[in-house]
């Protein structure tokens, strides 16, 4: 069985502020507070322009689970 390993892992929301750590190829690239943050991390890594969407593993909720507001 040849299953594709996720390139991107979105960690569960942090209970203190709802932010989600995003890792690309095992390296933390930032904390997202909304789906648009993930898009920006992927853009910076060159994914969306060159290759489209990479495999993503969502932990602790899918793409609809983000903080209601970023911390001030």
Image (cartoon, helix red, strand yellow):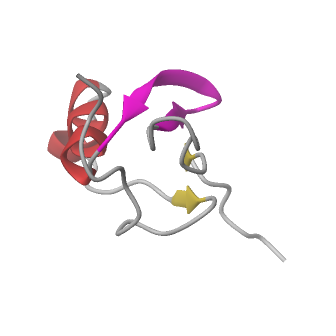
List x then y, in percent, for residue 9: 57, 46
| Quadrant in which the C terminus appears | top left
Vertical comparison of 72 with 62: above or below:
above
List x then y, in percent, for residue 54: 42, 53
Q: Which residues are magenta?
A: 20-33
Q: Nearer the viewer, residue 42 or 33?
A: 33
List x then y, in percent, for residue 47: 29, 40
Which residue is found at the position 47% from the left and 69% from the top? 62
Question: Main structural element of the magenta stretch: helix, strand or loop?
Answer: strand
Check if residue 63 falls in the magenta segment.
Answer: no
Which residue is found at the position 26% from the left and 48% from the top? 34
Is 69 on the left-hand or right-hand side of 33? left
List x then y, in percent, for residue 48: 21, 46
Q: Nearer the viewer, residue 72 or 53?
A: 72
Q: Quadrant of residue 46?
A: top left
Q: Nearer the viewer, residue 57 or 67?
A: 67
| Quadrant in which the N terminus appears | bottom right
Q: In the rendered picture of this protein, how many numbered marks are placed on residues?
A: 0
């Amino acid at each position: 069985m040849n299953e594709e390993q996720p390139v991107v892992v979105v960690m569960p929301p942090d209970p203190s502020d709802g932010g989600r750590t995003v890792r690309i190829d095992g390296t933390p690239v930032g904390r997202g507070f909304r789906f648009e943050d993930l898009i920006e991390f992927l853009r910076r890594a060159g994914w969306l322009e060159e290759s489209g969407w990479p495999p993503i593993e969502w932990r602790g909720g899918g793409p609809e689970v983000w903080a209601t507001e970023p911390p001030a």
